[in-house]
Image (cartoon, rainbow, N blue to C red):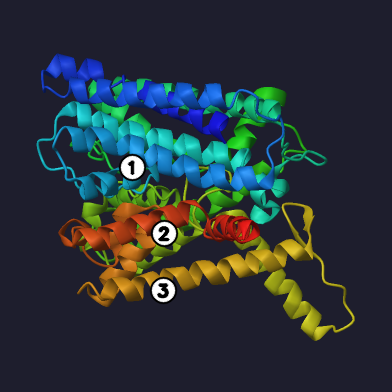
Amino acid sequence: MLYLLGWTAIVAGASLFLPVPISVADGDGFCWAFVLSAAVLLSLGGWAVRKGRGHPERVLVREGACFLVGTWILLTATATLPYFLTGTLSFADAWAESVSGVTTTGLTLLPAGTPRSLIFWRSLTQWLGGACIILLLLTVVPQVSEWFGMSLVMPRGQRASQLLSSMRRTSRRVMGVYAGATAAAMMVFAALGLSVFDALNLSLVTLATGGCFVPETGTGSPLISLAMMAVMLFSAGNFFFYSEITRRGLTADNPGAGEMRAMLRLVLVAGLLVSLHLWISGTYGISDSLRKGFFAAAAFMSTTGMDPAQLAGWSDFDRFILVLLIFIGGCIASSAGGLKILRLSVLANASIEELRRTLHSRMVLRVSTLGRVVPLSMVGQLLSFFALYTAVFFGAAMLLSLAGIAPLSAMGLSAACLTSAGPAALLAGDVGVYATMGEGWRLFCCALMLLGRLEVFSFLFVIQTLVSRWEGRW
């Protein structure tokens, strides 16, 4: 634990130096806060790595579960320091801002006129959070619980390894794809007319499906909108699939391609429905309807939620489709939130097979997806996950209504936090309600964001592990 968290602290501390050149160039006086925070993180990380130098090579389930929670706590604390030390936000608001950033939710409390160094730090925390989500899904999460469906998108016979050396290789491949895609996106945005600063920020948040930063000229340009759509759909794809392409090329035994095709089909259908209705209802002309309809479908399918302000004038039908998209989410090994396409595909096929078995009582139940047979134990676990996810959503919405929020606004905010699609709060209410509620309720929303990123069941597994460990000592 010390070794793994130590290296996480070192990476987080090193990232705090990146906003320093922007702070020095602008002369905002915040340089010291980043340097001091980096020094603290690097010192703690170096100490932890030295103490954990004699670690075992294999990561057991208990260590994986604790590291899963410890990573989010460490990254959130790291992101909090610059906001609080500079006096930009109170500690509670700084914590809420950092949780929203690290979980790539996209709800922000930063005031207008915030210095560029803090804006860049906000975008960078979203990018680091997206990278952390992907790496944990491909390395640590399979050790905590195998039911997440990761085995269904891996080549036959290949399983996630518990060895640290194997985790390092996987991490290097995936981060190479993630960083390379970010650099490519930045160059495209810059070539389309955005400033270097805007292009950098936009590439960071779109790759992380964060959705917090949109330059003023962002969605006004058709070419920039098209580029953003491509990046958002790429970020909602399966990064294990991407890393396997870089390692072995596009092979027939890579089942991640099936999940990618399913995601693109859903975006195509949803985009056509929204665009057609926007045109028929007279909201926009045919060209603007197609551009804005497909952009919104890609943004909310990837749970990025870019450019939500325009949705205020859309009909309930269009917004309802977008609500469905954020609950569906992207591919299973992506930084997108939501239930994920693969899991919903398994549940839909299980429902169809159960209906057939009801009509033919002697039939043997056989659930398959992406050309693979799904064990019935995994089907049962996914049903439990779906029920728990739904219960958390409605339970959180009910509690948020105690804060004096209208029921639809409470449901919109609950969905936004749980699916990591912050701007989606505007779909069922006012996204500004998050900034006007009390600090205690914002901290509750932060817990909901972390719960969504820990996939609900992982959080309960960690709690069970810690409680069992504590009871064992007694």
Measuring from the top left, give residue 390's x and y in whole percent. Answer: 49, 70
Which part of the image, by quadrant, shows the C terminus?
Answer: bottom right
The answer to whether residue 402 is left or right of residue 354 is left
In 3D space, how far apart are the residues under numbered discs 1 and 2 (Cα atoms)?
A: 14 Å
Measured Cα–Cα span from mark 1 to mark 3:
24 Å
Amino acid at the residue labelled 2: Leu
Name the element at disc 3. Answer: helix
SS for callout 1:
helix
In the picture of the structure, the residue carrying the numbered disc 3 is 394
Quarter of image, res 184: top left
Query: Residue 53, percent across and down?
Result: 61, 23
Q: Nearer the viewer, residue 390 or 57?
A: 57
Front position in the image: 370 or 89: 89
**What mark, if any, has residue 309 been given in the picture?**
none
Q: Where is residue 387 in the image (x, y as percent from the top left)?
A: 56, 72
At 74% from the left and 76% from the top, the residue drawn is 354
Q: Name the residue under label 1.
A: 101
33 lies left or right of 387: left
Q: Give residue 378's quadrant in the image.
A: bottom right
Q: Which amino acid does label 3 sit on?
A: Phe
Secondary structure under badge 2? Answer: helix
- Name the residue tied to disc 2: 418
The residue that appears at 64% across and 64% down in the rendered structure is: 382
Q: How crowded is mark 1: few (under 14 residues within 10 Å), some or many (20 or more)?
A: many
Q: Earlier in the sequence, mark 1 or mark 3?
A: 1
State yes or no: discs 1 and 2 in contact (Cβ < 8 Å).
no
Q: How crowded is mark 3: few (under 14 residues within 10 Å), some or many (20 or more)?
A: some
Residue 132 or 80: which is nearer the viewer?
Answer: 80
Left/right of residue 408 with respect to residue 347 in the rendered view: left
